[in-house]
């Protein structure tokens, strides 16, 4: 086991054991010397209740750079169209793809447009192992940037176009190099073209 891998393993517990664990998103793990092995640590590990796993701040997002839900969670009581999660549209071929082969899978893609959907594809040089834990945990697994003369910044795709999250309407506005922007839902549906 690679103890330097901050993603793995995670520590999971059942709801009935909530009182036995601290109410923190991570815990520190220290290994004592054992059978001629030196002690090591501390290591930070995700601590998550199984029943609340998908609401955890880091549990799923640590493995999915498109998952930015914790950056801007939906507001309780808001209208339905304002409840869409802050997730970049991800190609289905990347669902459940292990991080070590994700960059290779992305390089095989020829376009951000697949069928009638539009997906966020990072620059061809992007590799998850090059992203620090700090950047990943600040929802910067993909490079952030903007276009000259435009104050809308967000993750930059393989065409060097930033995706800006419209917090009010809860969709992505892809800032086009040629001018204007395309509004795209978190599922990749084209909502509107603005020239």
Image: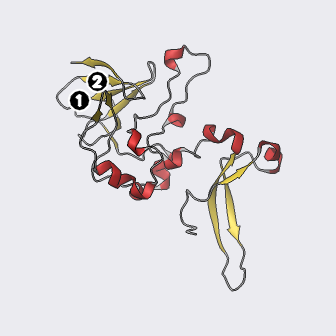
Residue nearer the viewer, 100 or 149: 100
Element assignment for label 1: loop
Location of mark 1 (residue)? 176
Q: Residue 129: horizontal and vertical position, in percent?
A: 42, 59
Q: Residue at x 44, y 40 (%)?
A: 66
First reached walking from the N terminus: tag 2 or tag 1: 1
Give the residue at the far bottom of this rendering.
36
Residue under the point 41% across and 35% down? 88
Q: Crowding near pointer 2: few (<14 within 10 Å), some, many (20+)?
A: some
Residue found at x 81% / y 47%? 17
Identify whether 166 is placed above or below 162: above
Number of marks in the image? 2
Q: Is residue 191 above or below residue 47?
A: above
Which residue in the protein does label 2 denote? 182
Depth order, front residue of 30/192: 192
Q: Are marks 2 and 1 in contact (CB under 8 Å)?
A: yes
Along the horizontal axis of the image, is 110 left or right of 104? left
| Callout 2: SS | strand
Q: Which mark is residue 88?
A: none
Please identify the quarter of the rendering in which residue 195 is found.
Answer: top left
* Placement of the N terminus among the 4 image quadrants: bottom right
Q: Would you identify the image quadrant in which residue 27 lies?
A: bottom right
Judged left or right of residue 46, residue 151 is: left
Residue at the image point whose x is 42% and y is 58% from the top: 100
The residues bearing labels 2 and 1 have C-alpha atoms spaced at a distance of 7 Å
Q: Residue furthest left?
A: 178
Residue 7 position in % (x across, y down): 55, 56
> Is the residue marked by circle 1 packed among few (<14), some (14-19), or many (20+) residues within 10 Å?
some
Q: Position of residue 141 (x, y in %)?
A: 42, 47
Q: 94 left or right of 38?
A: left
Q: Position of residue 165 (x, y in %)?
A: 40, 28
């Amino acid at each position: 086991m690679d103890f330097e891998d901050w993603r793995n393993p995670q520590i999971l517990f059942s709801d009935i054991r909530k009182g036995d664990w601290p109410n923190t998103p991570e815990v520190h793990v220290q290994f004592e010397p054992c059978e001629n092995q030196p002690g090591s640590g501390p290591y930070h590990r995700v601590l998550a209740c199984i029943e609340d796993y998908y609401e955890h701040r880091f549990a799923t997002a640590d493995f999915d750079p498109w998952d930015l839900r914790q950056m801007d969670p939906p507001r309780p009581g808001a209208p339905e169209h304002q409840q869409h999660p802050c997730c970049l549209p991800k190609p289905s071929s990347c669902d459940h793809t292990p991080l070590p082969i994700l960059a290779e899978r992305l390089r095989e893609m020829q376009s951000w447009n697949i069928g009638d959907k539009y997906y966020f594809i990072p620059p061809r040089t992007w590799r998850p192992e090059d992203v620090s834990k700090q950047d990943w945990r600040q929802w910067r697994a993909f490079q952030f940037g903007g276009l000259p003369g435009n104050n809308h910044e967000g993750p930059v795709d393989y065409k060097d176009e930033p995706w800006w999250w419209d917090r009010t309407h809860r969709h992505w506005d892809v800032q086009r190099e040629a001018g204007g922007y395309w509004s795209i839902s978190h599922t990749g549906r084209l909502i509107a073209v603005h020239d």
